Amino acid sequence: MRRYRKRTLLLMVGSALAVPALLLSLLSIKLVRDFADIGQTVGREYGEYMATIAAGAVENAFLDREQVNMVAARFVPPEGPGEVIRFLNRFQEENPLYLLSFFVLPEGLVFYSDLAPERSTPYRPLPDWVTDRILATMLKQGEIPSGLQHLQADHPDAPLQITYFTVAGSGGRLLGVAGFIWDLEEVRTNRDFFTQTLDRMVFNNESLFRGAFFDSPVAITILDQKGKPFYSSSRTATDGYIAERPFERLLPFYRVGVQLRDDRFASRITTVVWTSSAMIGITFLAIIAALAFSLRFLLREIELAELKSTFVSNVSHELKTPLALIRLFAETLQLGRVESEEKEKEFLGIIGKESERLTHLINNVLDINRIEQGKKTYRMVPLDLAVLVRETLEAYKFSLSKEGFLVESEIEDDLPPVTADGDAVTQALINLMENAIKYSREERYLRVTLRRDGDNAVISVTDKGMGIPASAHERIFEKFFRVEKGLVHDVKGSGLGLSLVKHIADAHGGEVRVASRPGRGSTFTVAFPFHPPRSGEDRATAATTPEDDEPQTGR
Ligand code: ADP
């Protein structure tokens, strides 16, 4: 239940931070994508705007020329059919843009200019649809159009552009229609015309919108009916057109394409998108990492708080039991109600043992406190561990056998001395033995050994008690940690004993290990090196007295 609540709490805190972080990241990604889209739209629209302006400028330049031609032609009309060819030749000479000039009389008779006949042969005679359309225009009596007229055919290999207008003789009588087939090759190679027109109307036109945000200069290209460029205002244009647009009234089979002169604009957008995305990603990861760290920290704090509260109740209980016994037997003795001297001795023994347990417990608590405050020091001296282990066992033997324990020991006597704090080593051994006793069930067995293992003196304490599940093997050495399942709940304890053992082992440059299976028992081993390393943080708290060379037991 408690675990369930803890998980809910962590889940709530986690999602309270992770969900907004995720939403924020998604929102930022959307904004960055919108920015990229807007950038592209702005680019495209600016391109379309430029294409429209450029197409209009070129068309108008052509139309202006034609307008002038038309006025000039009408100014000196042919006086009669005999003059028509001369009129046409003169006109074509003045206008290299035209490949063939023709004159259609109202009756349907067609005259042609006879300059450079070889190039104009394919157009002579005019296709029927052309003459038909022209005659149809003239036959509309009363509303004959007065301005320039255009006819186009967008054949993929040989497109056709024709301009025509009516010509009146003196007295205003309609003579016929003068028409011109454009020399499209001349159009395509007329670089100067395009350059001058575009410079005047587009590139040097101060009244045009320049696109404050779109400062990358454009290249204007003109493409033929097959999409092949035949003129470009710049040789260094980027690939691909940001906008394309056909001409409208003249040459509608040709198109204007707008390109960028460099990829400054696109690369700026790409840079913004990439840097923003990277920053969003990094920020998101940082939030998640911070979150994970905080949750771990929170979890530890919650666990520690829980452990501390059980610690208080456990320790109070641990203190109460021996105190109650001491009081009970002290009162009994005081009242002189003891029948025999033997009983009196037994009671005194119990009082002594219980006060020892109390002292031991209080020592554990005080030591942990000292360790936490960094004030714990060890008095390192050369020590004969065999003597120490034997004496400690001896002190416990009587009460152990009374409690029905089978005690075994195997102690190697000829080990070299170990540099150690005798009190600390004794405390560690007592903690391990007390645990072995506390956590034993029906099978009451205790085995203590001291042997050499390479460069270490190893003390081991074995019981055949309830054992420890593998999942808890590491955690039992943490402060306050207690296995919380089954029978263990019945056994009171502070959860400090093993953490002290570990600290003592570490401070001596050694280590503590556990081998245990639930229901089968446990073996704890503490290794003390004969030659502990001189450096290391645990050693920093150790105070050694090298002048004291005699092996000691620390008692
Ligand atoms: P305490 O015994 O006061 O609870 P310890 O730090 O000495 O605290 O031990 C931590 C936990 O490890 C114990 O609560 C117990 O669950 C488990 N434990 C320690 N020694 C043994 C043992 N010999 N047999 C079974 N479990 C043990």
Image (tube, rainbow, N blue to C red):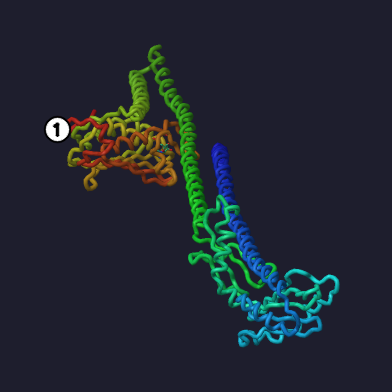
- Figure quarter occupied by ligand 1: top left
Q: Residue at x 43, y 39 (%)?
A: 441
Q: Which residue is mark 1?
A: 549
Residue at the right extreme of this rendering:
142
Relative to the observer, which residue lies in front, 124 or 515? Answer: 124
Q: Secondary structure at mark 1?
A: loop
Q: Quadrant of residue 448?
A: top left
Q: Tell me where residue 533 appears, x and y as whole percent.
A: 22, 41
Residue 46 coordinates in the image, percent (x, y): 60, 56
Q: Quadrant of residue 15?
A: top right
In the image, the residue with mark 1 has its CB under 8 Å from the nearest atom of ligand 1: no
Asked whether, in this view, residue 164 is left or right of residue 233, the answer is right
* Number of residue marks: 1
Name the foreground residue: 474 vs 146.
146
- Relative horizontal placement of residue 527, taking residue 415 as reference (left or right): right
Task: Report x, y in % for residue 395.
Answer: 29, 30
Of 378 and 79, which appears nearest the observer?
79
Local packing at callout 1 (Cα closer than 10 Å; few below 14, some 14-19, many 20+) is: few
Residue 199 location, quadrant? bottom right
Dot 1 amino acid type: Asp
- In the displayed structure, would residue 288 be above or below residue 218? above
Q: Position of residue 97 (x, y in %)?
A: 62, 75
Task: Locate the N terminus and report the quarter of the image it occupies.
Answer: top right
Of residues 473 and 296, the one drawn nearer to the viewer in this rendering? 296
